[in-house]
């Protein structure tokens, strides 16, 4: 990396070297297509099915409930568009939350153009969905509720089990975007009452460009990718065997190391939150104080633009973020922060620090050392900061 400290793990993660080792032979020596009937094709099929089993185990699903895709965005498209299209005779109403990832908001707009109705459930000041608010949006035409497992910006974890139960009791299907949560929260589709779930490989240190839709047995979707009929006709296109093998290896490693990893992250996250809030005046924590991802510390510093903070960190060789990478090149404030009740100018004053597998203790030391000085300097130049 060109920078010495990287605390932007929610935006992108490196591929674990153990994952890369597992993938390499499938690029060069064992490159056959699993659709081929020769011995080499059989080997590819075996790898595909063994990978399916590992990913299924990771989320406590059955093997035939895993559909490999090209990543989270495609899984989400297949889940939401696919489910709404397949089941439109039963109803045309979808409910999502205000803090969903931009991909889900854009899918909702697309579905509205096709004649579906979409409702958005608001969240509280921590970014959490309340069942009472969800209840008010349910109609007899509601067929799908899609609510994220955890937020990719502020790290708030939803009470997914309760939301899943709420949906299932009413005969409504429940999809969750588990991209931000996977590898940080133990996911169990059976326990959590999840019917459809989108996951990606990179978020568990696998390669980018691979993901999966977990689709429980009684649920059906229309394909959104039409072609040669791979993945039981639900995701056509020759399977990316190296990528899929990589995702499975990443899931296997994550399953055995997650507990230790999460414990390590929590100590760093809590240290970051504790020290930042005590050392820097007029600093606030965004997101839930306790029900948050172990990797996520998200702050707001009054009178300090997040972009200016990010550039000051950049000068010091430290990679951090102001929010979602997918919308970071626009001047719009984060829709998630606005949904939690922040004003536009407050939402712009935010900084996101996210920890990952290769974070070191010294990285946290470096950031904690740099931050008070950077915030102080920017406040000195700020025409609006009136604090101490
Ligand atoms: N959902 C969430 C919560 C995300 O953070 C992202 C982006 N990493 C996506 C969906 C889309 O993922 P991708 O760009 O990998 O398809």
Image (cartoon, rainbow, N blue to C red):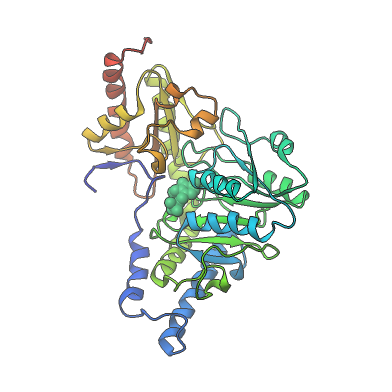
**Relative to residue 261, is residue 378 depicted above or below?**
above
The C terminus - image quarter? top left
- Residue sitting farthest toward the bottom: 38
Q: Position of residue 230 (x, y in %)?
A: 52, 74
The answer to which of 374 and 38 lies nearer the viewer is 38
User: Which residue sits at x=40%, y=86%?
Assistant: 40
Q: Position of residue 377 (x, y in %)?
A: 26, 19
Q: Look at the image and tell me whether residue 189 can be seen.
A: no
- The residue positioned 47% from the left and 27% from the top of the image is 285
User: In the rendered image, which quarter is residue 216 located in?
Assistant: bottom right
Q: How many marks?
A: 0
Q: Viewed as shown, does residue 387 lie left or right of 93?
A: left
**Is residue 246 or residue 385 the one in the foreground?**
385
Q: Can I make out residue 61 in this image?
A: yes
Q: 304 or 290: which is nearer to us?
A: 304
How far from the left and from the top, in percent, is residue 281? 39, 16
């Amino acid at each position: 990396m060109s920078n010495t400290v990287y605390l932007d793990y929610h935006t992108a993660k490196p591929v674990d070297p153990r994952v890369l080792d597992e993938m390499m032979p499938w690029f060069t020596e064992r490159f056959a297509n699993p659709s081929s009937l020769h011995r080499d094709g059989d080997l590819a099929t075996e790898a595909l099915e063994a990978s399916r089993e590992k990913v299924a185990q990771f989320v406590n699903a059955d093997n035939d409930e895993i559909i490999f895709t090209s990543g989270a965005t495609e899984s989400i498209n297949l889940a939401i568009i696919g489910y709404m299209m397949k089941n439109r005779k039963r109803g045309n109403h979808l409910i999502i939350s205000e803090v969903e990832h931009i991909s889900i908001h854009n899918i909702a707009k697309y579905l509205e153009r096709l004649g579906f109705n979409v409702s958005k459930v608001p969240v509280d000041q921590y970014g959490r969905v309340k069942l009472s608010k969800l209840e008010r949006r349910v109609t007899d035409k509601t067929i799908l509720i899609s609510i994220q497992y955890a937020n990719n910006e502020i790290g708030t974890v939803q009470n997914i089990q309760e939301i899943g139960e709420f949906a299932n009791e009413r005969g409504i299907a429940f999809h969750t975007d588990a991209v931000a949560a996977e590898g940080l929260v133990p996911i169990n589709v059976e326990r959590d009452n999840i019917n459809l779930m989108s996951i990606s490989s990179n978020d568990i240190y696998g390669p980018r460009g691979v993901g999966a839709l977990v689709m429980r047995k009684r649920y059906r979707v229309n394909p959104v990718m039409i072609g040669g009929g791979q993945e039981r006709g639900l995701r056509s296109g020759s399977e990316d065997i190296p990528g899929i093998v990589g995702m499975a290896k990443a899931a296997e490693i994550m399953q055995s190391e997650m507990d230790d990893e999460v414990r390590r992250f929590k100590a760093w996250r809590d240290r970051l939150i504790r020290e930042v809030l005590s050392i820097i005046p007029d600093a606030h924590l965004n997101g839930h104080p306790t029900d948050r991802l172990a990797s996520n510390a998200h702050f707001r510093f009054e009178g300090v633009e997040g972009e200016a903070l990010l550039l000051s960190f950049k000068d010091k060789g430290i990679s951090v973020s102001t929010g979602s990478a997918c919308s970071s090149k626009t001047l719009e404030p984060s829709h998630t922060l606005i949904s939690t009740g922040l004003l536009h100018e407050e939402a712009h004053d935010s900084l996101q620090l996210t920890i990952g597998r290769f974070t070191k203790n010294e990285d946290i030391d470096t950031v904690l050392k740099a931050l008070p000085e950077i915030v102080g300097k920017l406040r000195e130049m700020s025409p609006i900061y009136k604090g101490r």
